[in-house]
Image: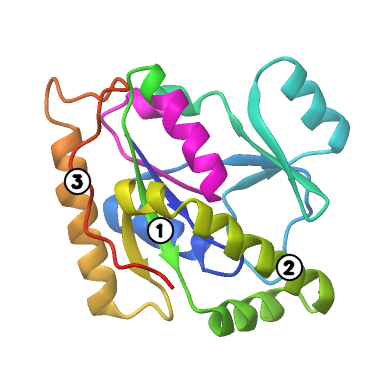
């Protein structure tokens, strides 16, 4: 069973991924990327590859859904299909476009996947982003934030229907406990015998606040 944390740049996806994995005794989904490791962060859920090797794995279909973001390539190892079929919980992070692709692939292979929408106000995201990347280009960052705003507005239906909403302006113990409770309730339902999703109509949509 897979839990995917999706959110915009600087929303705190990697932090929440690692914190949830520890709390739920879950495995962390390692993603391939060609970007360099960040000096300001500890354990990152990525394997850092050279461009040529990344492309080679894509050509051999060991990496699927490759995307370019800020000049770096990202994707998913095909082992994620087995993780979706497992009763054990695996947690990872992605953008909302990749979330839809993953849902289709995991459901097609009779696995289970659920999502957490990690939302943070733009001011909070900007502060986090500039803290981790001192050499950022302000104009490029503003362009990215504007692009992501449009992207997530277009995917509002998907997020409202399939994702657990989490307001990540700062990780407070109470807010995090509520998130863990919601995830446990959903994963318990998904892991019941005979309850594997196979592309049929989903369960009733979760009540998610409208993000304006």
Residue positioned 20% across, 57% down in the render: 182
Q: Is residue 139 shown to the viewer in this render?
A: yes
Q: Residues within 10 Å of mark 3 (few under 14, many from 20)?
A: few
Q: Quadrant of the C terminus?
A: bottom left
Q: How is the image coloured?
A: rainbow
Residue 130 in the figure: left or right of residue 18: right
Does the stretch in magenta take in 89? yes
Question: Which label is found at residue 186?
Answer: 3
Disc 1 from disc 2: Cα separation: 26 Å
Which of the two discs, 3 and 2, labels the residue nearer the N terminus? 2
Residue positioned 46% across, 24% down in the render: 105
Helix, strand or loop under label 3: helix
Helix, strand or loop under label 1: strand
Which of the two discs, 3 and 1, labels the residue nearer the N terminus? 1
Q: Nearer the viewer, residue 136 or 206?
A: 206
Disc 3 from disc 2: Cα separation: 35 Å
Question: Which label is found at residue 117?
Answer: 1
């Amino acid at each position: 069973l897979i839990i995917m944390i999706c959110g915009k740049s600087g929303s705190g996806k990697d932090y929440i991924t690692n914190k949830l994995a520890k709390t739920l005794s879950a495995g962390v989904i390692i993603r391939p990327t060609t970007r360099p490791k960040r000096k300001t962060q500890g354990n990152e859920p990525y394997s850092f590859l050279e461009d040529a090797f990344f492309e080679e794995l894509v050509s051999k279909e060991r990496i699927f859904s490759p995307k370019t973001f800020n000049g770096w390539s990202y994707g998913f190892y095909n082992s994620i299909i087995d993780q979706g079929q497992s009763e054990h919980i695996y947690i990872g992070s992605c953008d909302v476009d990749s979330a839809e692709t993953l849902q289709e692939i995991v459901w097609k292979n009779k696995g289970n996947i659920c999502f957490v929408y990690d939302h943070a106000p733009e001011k909070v995201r900007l502060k986090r982003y500039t803290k981790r990347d001192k050499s950022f280009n302000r104009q490029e960052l503003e362009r990215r934030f504007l692009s992501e705003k449009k992207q997530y507005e277009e995917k509002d239906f998907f997020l409202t229907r399939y994702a657990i909403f989490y307001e990540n302006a700062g990780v407070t113990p109470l807010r995090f406990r509520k998130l863990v409770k919601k995830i446990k309730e959903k994963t318990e339902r998904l892991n019941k015998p005979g309850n594997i999703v196979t592309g049929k109509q989903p369960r009733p949509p979760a009540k998610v606040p409208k993000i304006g």
